[in-house]
Image (cartoon, grey):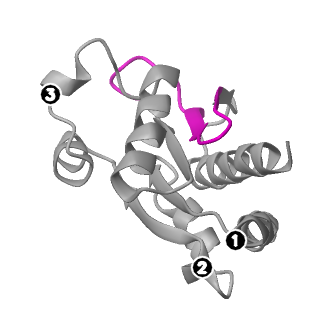
Amino acid sequence: MKELVGIAEQVAAKLIARKQTIAVAESSAGGLIAASLLAVPGASAYFLGGAVVYTRDARRVLMDISDEGMKGLRSSSEPYAKFLAEQMRSRFGSDWGLSETGAAGPTGNRYGDAAGHSCMAVAGPATQVMTLETGSNDRLANMQMFAATALKLLLRKLEG
């Protein structure tokens, strides 16, 4: 968690300096992204909210994305990660949306992705989507890596 908070401190400094805000949707990172951002004192200046969108019910209830709204999309994919980040940004009226969706392990997901697969996206003044494959089935290590990679992706967009 200390590594994550270290990255989150850098993100927080950039967001505060820019007077910008963020909202987060995560799945297989299990809340570690939001927890890291909230561990930084003064988080209320930039963190508007977050959701752990781990199930279909959570997607419907927390994100207001119906099964019909998922037509042509599948979880744990780059298009879905981008959609989630954009949805968080829109719903919260934040400058930035950050999302993560994947398979932490020890087994893969029902979509055929191996453990260690994660897609993440940043939506805002600059948008980027990426896929991470850790090649590991270590659930806790993957969760940590997914969160760190998502935070670093956001930091790069804030620096760019």
Residue behind mark 2: 45
Circle on res. 156? none
At label 1, which amino acid type do we have? Met
Residue 148, percent across and down? 71, 53
Quadrant position of the N terminus in the picture: bottom right
Q: Secondary structure at mark 1?
A: loop
Residue behind mark 3: 67
Residue 32 left/right relative to 58: right
104 is higher (above) or lower (below) than 92: above
Q: Earlier in the sequence, mark 3 or mark 2?
A: 2
Q: Which residues are magenta?
A: 109-130
Is 125 in front, or is 154?
125
The single residue placed furthest to the right in the displayed view is 159
Q: Residues within 10 Å of mark 1 (few under 14, many from 20)?
A: few
The single residue placed furthest to the top in the displayed view is 72
Residue depicted at x 38% and y 41%: 87
Q: Earlier in the sequence, mark 1 or mark 3?
A: 1
Residue behind mark 1: 1
Is residue 80 found inside the magenta-colored segment of the image?
no
Q: Secondary structure at mark 3?
A: loop
At label 2, which amino acid type do we have? Ala
Is 159 in front, or is 153?
159
Q: Disc 2, disc 1: CB below 8 Å?
A: no
Between label 1 and label 3, give the one nearer the viewer: 3
22 is higher (above) or lower (below) than 106: below
At label 3, which amino acid type do we have? Asp
Distance from Cα at disc 3 to Cα at disc 2: 34 Å
Q: Earlier in the sequence, mark 2 or mark 1?
A: 1
